[in-house]
Amino acid sequence: MKILFIGGTGTISTAITEQLAATSHELFLLNRGNNNHELPKNVRVITADINNEDDVKAKLKGMTFDSVCDFIGFVPEHVERDFRIFNGITKQYIYISSASAYAKPVRNHIITEGTSLVNPYWEYSRNKIACERFLMDKYRYEGFPVTIVRPSHTYCKKSVPLGLHGLKGSFQVLKRMMEGKPVLVHGDGSSLWTMTYNQDFARGFIGLIGNPHAIGEVFQITSDESLTWNQIYETVASHLGVSLNPLHVSSDFLVAVAPKEYDLAGNLLGDKACTVVFDNTKLKRAVPGFCATTSFYEGSRIVIDYVMSHPECQVPDPEFDAWCDKVVKAVETAKSGF
């Protein structure tokens, strides 16, 4: 097959790119060329800004694709642009949405593709919902061959996935663990969450490319493993060889006192503070044999080993550290008043 990725170098798409490059498929990446240094040699790059429609159309002139996949479409204007560019030149258009679009507050913790889409806490999720609606209307009324994929919390080897961290990633949380400082855990840590290793996600995604059963359909791709946040943090600490010193703090309180740029209303109340268990039955029917095989214990070990052996992944975040200390002090002060 002849496949085009818009983006192709992010957390999710890098794993898919790597796996597809090991097959006989012809893979093209359309991006601005900023992060292409680690691409497999047989991947062909079309250097362009997808927002420059005239330039993109000129560079794609005469080309057709079996599948076009957009990993960087965040607002309706992005998918409207894609429709103008790719309608008529691809047999399939795959849009990467988000499982955060599912209804919050959660009414049923078992999530399927039929779960309602509404998220009053997070503009990011509302924009994804709007993108989905536009694309499904184009499928229903104009025959645009859409497939929608909803990832949840998907991670790669370069960053440890955690529930709460600053703008520079999760390393500062690891640093707090190693220093024996209190680590903030939202709520009481007992809500369930799902972590999916990007290599597992990639296998499910590739099974949908060119799949006739995927046209006009929506699929979530996640691990089947559910863990509490306490288990997640304890697993990470165990890989670091330290004891976890957790401080459980109400999600509402964290939202109220966090810097606005952390967007905790969306990240917590609109997503990670909710217990969710994903039912991947639909994906497994469309992609027989698919199963996410990397447990969080194994995946997090891979990530910890990589991060701790690659200094470029160890990005300190003193601002987040200072905020954590303020929250800890506020909680301890409140406790001492009783």
Image (cartoon, rainbow, N blue to C red):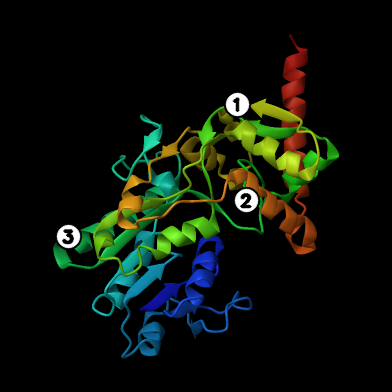
Picture residue at 78% right of the left edge, 44% below the top: 240
Find residue 178 and report its image quarter. Answer: top right
Of residue 237 and residue 273, the one placed in the foreground of this image is 237
Label whose residue precedes the other's in the sequence (2 or 3): 3
Q: Is residue 257 left or right of residue 9?
A: right
Label whose residue precedes the other's in the sequence (2 or 1): 1
Of residue 147 and residue 256, the one placed in the foreground of this image is 147
Query: Which residue position is annotated with label 3?
Result: 140
Whether the residues at callouts 2 and 1 have beta carbons within 8 Å, the answer is no
Q: Is residue 58 visible?
A: yes
Amino acid type at mark 3: Arg
Q: Is residue 24 above or below residue 186?
A: below
Q: Which mark is residue 78?
A: none
Q: Marks 1/3: CA distance?
A: 43 Å
Residue count near mark 2 (Cα–Cα under 10 Å), binned few <14, some 14–19, many ≥20? many
Of residue 150 and residue 196, the one placed in the foreground of this image is 196
**Quarter containing the N terminus:** bottom left
Q: Which mark is residue 250?
A: 1
Q: Nearer the viewer, mark 2 or mark 3?
A: 2
The residue tagged with tag 3: helix, strand or loop?
helix
Q: Nearer the viewer, mark 1 or mark 3?
A: 3
**Quarter containing the C terminus:** top right
Q: Marks 2/3: CA distance?
A: 39 Å
Q: Is residue 146 left or right of residue 231?
A: left
Residue count near mark 1 (Cα–Cα under 10 Å), binned few <14, some 14–19, many ≥20? some
Query: Which residue position is annotated with label 2?
Result: 299
Q: Marks 2/1: CA distance?
A: 28 Å
Find residue 246 and report its image quarter. Answer: top right
Q: Is residue 3 above or below residue 126?
A: below
The residue tagged with tag 2: helix, strand or loop?
helix
